[in-house]
Image (tube, rainbow, N blue to C red):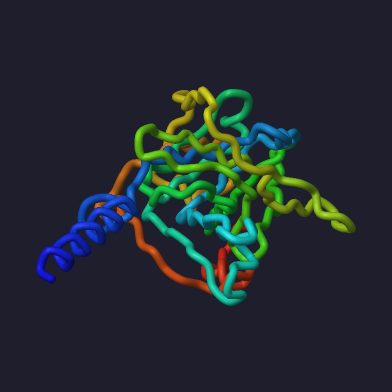
Amino acid sequence: MHSRITVLVVVCVLVAGCTGSPGGRDLEGTVDVYVGNHGQPVDGFEHLNVTVTAVSFVPADRASGDPNTPANGTTTERFDPRVNRTTVDLTAVQGGAAALVDTVTLPVREEYATVVVRVTSIEATLASGERANVTAPGGTLNASAGFAVDPSSETTLLVDLTAVEAEGTNGTYRLEPVGTETGLNLTTPTTATAGPESGANAPGTAGDQVTPTATPTPEAERSTETETTNATDAGLTNTTASMSA
């Protein structure tokens, strides 16, 4: 009797050890998160400064592959690692250039289907020197993804953003995600400089320049928080942006 019990216990421990890292935690991988303007260039802008304050990652549902229709019909996973508050001039991150928002740690998943970027401020200047009205409805941009996180290698993730003129308006633009790409050889621009007023409260003059890479602050320590949320656009939208005119 005692031998049988011992064998069963050993088997259970071996099986449990195969599902994650020692201690029962998920294996994790590193992702470098960049923002750029590659697929649809923002022509006609002198500057298009976008302030990113949060990035969330939604794995594909293992049953349906759609993060908005999980197997139980009500909830899905979402990971919200803390990132640096970063102001990016999209006109300076075209071609092979991109701005590093942060390096984050995520649980290993076969596929992350959606990347949600939270934007709290947009300041835009046209090539003519006029201010432009650019908005991000709801303050969030849901970019389609499709990348895996591997514990043995670092993933380079580009979130591609653009601005399109809204139909039926006169000079009003909407910030939109083009998509995401991985495995790119990206460069970070070094020509832009950050002044004391750069960021959310910067005045919108044609001469403003904003560094595309933020300086880390004590509040920007890297950690991964797992939360269960409603799997709808409304459930993923929990930050309201205040846009500069």
Q: Residue at x 59, y 36 (%)?
A: 181
State whether residue 51 appears in this view. Answer: yes
163 and 234: which one is in front?
234
When the figure is inspected, residue 138 is found, relative to residue 128, above or below; the finding is below
Q: Residue at x 64, y 67 (%)?
A: 69
Q: Relative to residue 80, is residue 70 depicted above or below?
A: below
Identify which residue is drawn at 29% across, 58% down: 16
Q: Residue drawn 55% across and 37% down?
A: 158
Q: Picture coordinates of residue 199 (x, y %)?
A: 47, 49
Q: Where's residue 82, x and y in %? A: 37, 55
**148 left or right of 219 in image:** right
Q: Which residue appears farthest toward the left when viewing the image?
A: 2
Report the quarter where the N terminus lies.
bottom left
Query: Residue most toward the right?
Result: 168
Q: Quadrant of the C terminus?
A: bottom right
On screen, residue 31 versus residue 90, left or right, reads: left
Residue nearest the viewer, comparing 78 with 143: 78
Which quadrant of the structure image shows residue 9? bottom left
Residue 214 vertical placement versus 121 (above, below): above
Is residue 241 shown above or below 161? below
Q: Position of residue 167 (x, y in %)?
A: 87, 55
Pick whichever, 8 or 79, lies toward us. Answer: 8
Residue 51 in percent (x, y) is at 51, 50
Task: Kindly give the residue lying farthest to the front in the view shown.
Answer: 1
Residue 195 visible in the snapshot: no
